[in-house]
Image (cartoon, rainbow, N blue to C red):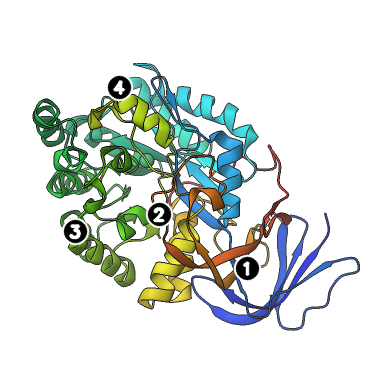
Amino acid sequence: MTDVLIRNGRLVTAEHDFQADLLMSGEFIAAVGENLAAPPGAEIVEAAGLLVVPGGVDAHTHLDLGLGAAHVSDGWFLGSRAAAYGGTTCVVEHPGFGPEGCPLEHQLNIYRKNAVESAIDYGLHGVFQHWDERAARDLPELVRAGCPSFKAYLTYGGRLDDGALLAALKVLGATGGLMTVHAENHAIVSHLAADLESSAPHLASSHPRSRPGYAEALAVDTAICLAEAAGGAPLYIVHLSAAAGLEHVRAARAAGKKVWAETCPQYLVLTDDCYEGDFGQALKYVMAPTPRKREDVLTLWRGLLDGTISVVASDHCSFAWADKKTRAAGNVFRSPGGVPGVETRLPLLYSEGVVKRGMSLSRWVELVSTAPARLFGLTGKGGLQAGFDADVVVFDPHFEKKLAAENLHQAVDYTPFEDLLVRGWPKMVFARGRKIVDGERFMGEPGSGRFVARQPFSAY
Ligand SMILES: [Zn+2]
């Protein structure tokens, strides 16, 4: 593999922001400094006026999710290619539920098998769909085998009830694992949904009305209490969407509890206005949790800027819009949920955060790369130090793009961010030293990514 010298870029990490050269040799970053000499035969990239940042780490994707007969439209290769175009060089995938009663490794094995198509590196979270003695027995070995984070849903069919969540937190916390939680109170959501499905299934607004912010806040509070009861087991709240939930996270962190929160671009850009108007249009935005009010959006931005929220992930889940319309057939509760966003995550947070809200470049890098790499045990990713994986993005801070399904590479027929003007876009992307994106050209291939056995959790 050719060495690559990136010259005169503005290197940005979570800790530093400085003008320098960066040399990649083989799969690793070999040196960072001023006036580095180019080894014979090295490719030279002139990066004056451009940013050089660690490759994005997307800690929450569903590139390969099946839900009954429905399947997301991309799969590992096309999904990972779209990620690369957007500057993400590593994802940690959340597997869907397996057959009832299946052991923990069941879904990990299936996802591991399909993921060999990935063009970028990947890790896998585990998923709980029940709790029993076998799960307690199997967990430590799975953590040791490179899967130190698991997800518990507090709603849906495979949810853990409070007792099971407490038990799982105890074992996971004691074995160096990190519990990630989809926090929505199931009793509230199912009660409201039953009511609205019989009275107003044809209104898209019935969907957000069935999953109010307080249902999220209740579940966040429950999870925080139980993690504390489990001896201070580390806890990570996925896709936080509501101000009320964020206040519980803020209080827990202020009290020194090991609690981290993630949010997603859709909760930072959209509001529940997206459910008004045409039913078919509104189905694009069926996701759980749902976008909230303007005040929630402002509160989430404050949380990102003041450190209450630690990670921005995509929760990319690209059920096609056409599929949503067919399956909903006039009933919003029958639509598959989720939105695509693995390609737009870095540029959106740059444009909406750095350009519009004065977020520092280092904070941007921390949210989209460094913090998820550290929280999820991806040693050697999320930074630009010599010895780290040469996952590097050359980012053009001035490039403008009006987002539309046609000018993105996600294999899906819509984007929830249609017509949004974004400033800043990746120009060149390197994954373990290999150039995989050069402008519009994709140079990776199925299988150019690798499974990353992640390290056990260590506080960040
Ligand atoms: Zn998800």
Dot 2 or dot 3, earlier in sequence:
3
Of tags 2 and 1, which is closer to the observer?
A: 2
Tell me the tag on residue 132. 4
Of tags 1 and 3, which is closer to the observer?
A: 3
Residue 390 placement (x, y as % from top left) = 68, 59
Instruction: Identify the image quadrant of residue 173.
Output: top left
The residue located at (33%, 66%) in the rendering is 304
Q: Nearer the viewer, residue 229 or 105?
A: 105
Dot 4 or dot 2, earlier in sequence:
4
The amino acid sitting under disc 4 is: Asp
From the viewer's perspective, tell me whether residue 271 is left or right of residue 123: left
Whether residue 36 can be seen here: yes
Dot 2 or dot 1, earlier in sequence:
1
- The residue that label 3 is drawn on is 243
- The residue that label 2 is drawn on is 417
Of tags 3 and 4, which is closer to the observer?
A: 3
The residue located at (56%, 30%) in the rendering is 112
- The residue that label 1 is drawn on is 385
- C-alpha distance separating marks 2 and 3: 22 Å
Residue 260 placement (x, y as % from top left) = 32, 56
The amino acid sitting under disc 1 is: Gln
